[in-house]
Image (cartoon, rainbow, N blue to C red):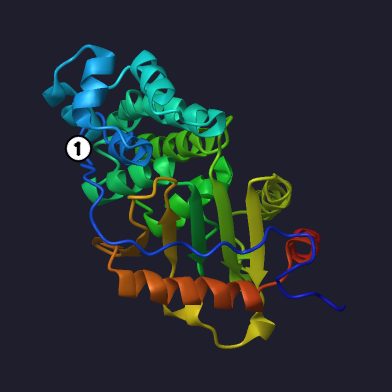
Amino acid sequence: MNRRRGGAQGSPAYRPPVARCGTTGRDADSPRPGRWHGSAVRHESGKTVKDAAAWLGMGESNVSKIEKAKQAIKVQTVRALCQFYDVDASKADYLIKLANESNQRGWWSQYRETVPDWFRQFIVLEADALDLWTYENEYVPGLLQTADYVRALMRSNQPTMTDEKVGQQVRLRRERQERLDGDYPPRLHFFINEAIIRRPVGPPEVMREQLAHLIESSKLDHVDLRIVPFSAGSHPGMSGPFVMFQFPEEDAPAFVYLEHERGAVYQEDPGDIDRYTVIVAELERLSLSPADSREMLSEAANQ
């Protein structure tokens, strides 16, 4: 069979992330970890904090706290500022959505006993991102896992895990998936090692359902799913799985998330971002096209 490698045939063009330095100011334990990034929007408009405060009829310190995510922001305040800053409709819609989510992001607090601090920060970044590039070499990415696949995975990785804990893991993944498949989903780019679809996890019916779910997910407009085949040989993804985040705001840094057995590392140094940008481009070059990836998934499901 003549499979095409990644690139032009029917797939979104690769959009490399922009390396930016700085910190996000997000706190994984904050009830409002998402940022509205109002300062960036204000700077673009040429307005000052004093101007915004006068427009809103509030103190300058309140505007500063809102911009730094130290104070909740109401949706009507976002609308008023978007009008004052002359923000275009599509960006205003996004900012309103972000404000809504930033006041609701405490949903994951119910999983405090299940989710370590370092992964709560990941959930926050995941929900705020405009683009996510994910490479996995051992497991189906969490955002694409079916409930039965999660259960089988938990049972094999942690045989002593209680049914309650397993159920929490299933619900957590479902919550994450629902939040990334709404009206304004981020663009999701997945590179999956072929070994993942060849190695059975759980009974045959669980794996068939999981592969079918990957096929259906790959057809979504905001999802670009590609298999990195064995035939690609040695490639830079072999150093380990990663997730790279890019955010819509001009002042927001890109991040690379690297997980290890006892925690995770969040890299934002421009040199590291540049290196992973090259890795993503190379994985795109070596991977199958989305259509050929679906064909390989279908073959694996029918074996």
Question: Based on the displayed image, in which of its 4 quarters is residue 239 positioned?
Answer: bottom left
Image coordinates of residue 149 in percent, x first then y, are 56, 49
Query: Which sits in the foreground, 28 or 210?
Result: 28
Asked if 244 appears above or below 121 in the picture, the reply is below
Question: Based on the displayed image, in which of its 4 quarters is residue 276 positioned?
Answer: bottom left
Residue at left offset 34%, top offset 29%: 102
Q: Is residue 217 left or right of residue 185?
A: right
Q: How many marks?
A: 1
Residue furthest out toward the right: 1
Residue at left offset 28%, top offset 16%: 55
Query: Which sits in the foreground, 262 or 58?
Result: 58
Q: Is residue 294 left or right of residue 191?
A: right
Image coordinates of residue 294 in percent, x first then y, are 76, 60
Quarter of the rendering occupied by the C terminus: bottom right
Image coordinates of residue 196 in percent, x first then y, are 59, 66
Report the residue marked by disc 1: 29
Image coordinates of residue 64 in percent, x first then y, are 17, 30
Instruction: Identify residue type, mark 1.
Output: Asp
Asked if 35 appears above or below 80 in the picture, the reply is below
Question: Based on the displayed image, in which of its 4 quarters is residue 70 positioned?
Answer: top left
Q: Is residue 44 shown to the viewer in this render?
A: yes
